[in-house]
Image (cartoon, helix red, strand yellow):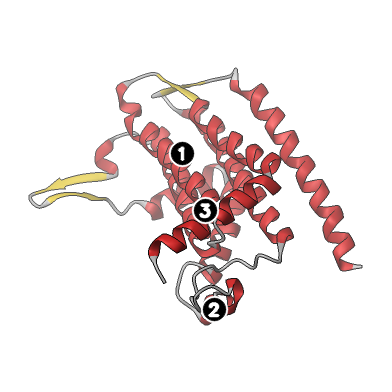
Amino acid sequence: MHLEELINWEGKCLKNNMEKYIELINNSYNIISILSYISNIKTPKSLAYFTFNNQIRASLIQSLLALLRNHEVQSKLMLRHAIETGMLAAYSLIEPDIEKYLINEKDGARPVKVMNKVYKFIENLFPDYSNRLKKVKDEINEFYAHGNLFNSFVTSPNRENIYGLAFFDRNRDDDFKLKIGIWQIGHIACILFDLLYEASLMSIVVERNEEISKRYSELLKESQSFRYKFEIEFGKRKL
């Protein structure tokens, strides 16, 4: 077994999945991309928000690429990272001071433990988004965020039948679950878009970009059409 061979195998997985689901992938990716256009800079104090915003997109894209390479656990971990960063971004629109998130000590910078305040803030001001994001995050925490026997069984040495190595943890025979996973990443991007779009109205450090709403509505409509197709397919699978 050589690392180069594993890299090549990942490349094949990525290419095959891209070819099969390019329209769905493009929808999720395009929703992720427009997160950067939600707001425009109003003051230099928006630095924390735009830094978080960039990380949201990076984490969501990493989640998408991991899933397309058949690494489901890795994908879910990055999805959780995106959710948490999205909530931080919303909070930073109201509490923009860098010192609330990062402090310098003699040994260097370290993050401030602020997530509990962030969760309460989102829950109080945006309860619907809070509940929807928490539901996904709780599922990830239960099944994917920590080592457990569930994941160990899923990562089967016989799944890919290469070198006897337990390396891929997504069942290649379950295309329906893969499509749902790709769609879910775009769906989380939609929830975060809505959250940040609303929160930006309360902010003094950014100006909401009203022009992006039309493009977002088009992508959301496309995403909902995919969901409708999945519901029909799921109904047929149950028959």
Check the picture and name the quadrant holding the N terminus.
Answer: bottom left
Residue type, mark 1 in image: Ala
The secondary element bearing badge 3 is classed as helix
Which residue in the protein does label 3 denote?
Answer: 11
Relative height, residue 92 to residue 177 (above, below)? above
- Real-space Cα distance between discs 3 and 2? 19 Å
- Check disc 1: other Cα within 10 Å, few if <14, some if 14-19, many if 20+: many
- Real-space Cα distance between discs 1 and 2? 42 Å
Dots 3 and 1: beta carbons under 8 Å?
A: no
Relative height, residue 11 to residue 41 (above, below)? below
- Check disc 2: other Cα within 10 Å, few if <14, some if 14-19, many if 20+: some
- Residue 94 lies in quadrant: top left
The secondary element bearing badge 1 is classed as helix
Which residue in the protein does label 1 denote?
Answer: 90
Which numbered disc, 1 or 2, marks the residue that appears first in the sequence? 1
Near-viewer residue (126 or 52): 52
Residue at the spot 10% in from the left edge and 52% down from the top edge: 107
Is residue 218 visible to the viewer in this orientation of the structure? Answer: yes
On the rendered structure, is 69 left or right of 18?
left
- Real-space Cα distance between discs 3 and 1? 35 Å
Residue type, mark 2 in image: Pro
Residue type, mark 3 in image: Gly
Q: Position of residue 187 (x, y in %)?
A: 64, 45
Question: Number of labelled discs?
Answer: 3
